[in-house]
Amino acid sequence: MEDFFGYHSEWNLGSPGGWDYQRTTQIIGKEVWIKLNEIQSIGVDLDMDHPLFFPLNSFTEMLVQVHKTLAGNNPGLIAVVAEEETLESVTENRNLAQQLSSIEGITGVLMAPQELELKDSKVSWRGRPVSVLFVDFNTDVLV
């Protein structure tokens, strides 16, 4: 193992963007590890599927748990809020919204802050109450 230097991995802690990059890196890393071992057995077992390498899954579960704490098992909308100009270009926010939508009873929506509204004293999006907000933008967006 003295000659094994590893491979690049991104841990942008505190950011689902970094976590999504980590997921992608793990998928690539796993394939590289398999290929390397086909060429030359390294003799080290790695668990490339360990949950710690896919923190976005746990973050998604956390957001859903917050929803359930607030709304029980009722369906709900979890908003991923980002700068309007990044909605199409920031893949990790789209991925987060899609992953949330893959959970039964949850709709994940990527939106700009100005799409939120107040309806019947509740933060809403297009008339639907929002149970949880994940905000991924700089505070100057609100100014």
Image (cartoon, rainbow, N blue to C red):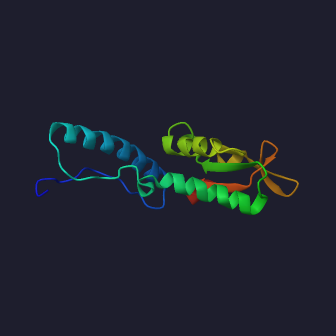
Q: Residue at x 48, y 57 (%)?
A: 15
The quadrant the C terminus occupies is: bottom right
Residue placed furthest toward the left: 3
- Residue 76 in the image: x percent, y percent? 75, 49
Q: Is residue 91 visible?
A: yes
Question: Residue at the location (58% across, 47% down)?
Answer: 83
Picture residue at 64% right of the left edge, 42% below the top: 101
**Which of the pair 68/42 is nearer the observer?**
42
Q: Residue furthest right?
A: 120
Q: Which of these two is toward me, 5 or 38?
A: 38
Residue 111 visible in this rendered orientation of the protein: no
Q: Residue 35 versus residue 62: which sits nearer the camera?
A: 35
In the image, taking residue 117 as reference, residue 45 lies left or right, namely left
Left or right: 120, with 73 as reference point: right
Residue 45 in percent (x, y) is at 27, 52
Place of residue 121 in the rendered image (x, y in percent of width and height, measured from the top left): 85, 58
Query: Looking at the rendering, in which quadrant would you find the N terminus?
Result: bottom left
Count of labels shown?
0
Direction from residue 95 to residue 28 in the image, left or right: left
Question: In the image, residue 104 lies at what x, y percent?
Answer: 69, 44
- Residue 73 lies, with reference to residue 69, above or below; the image says above
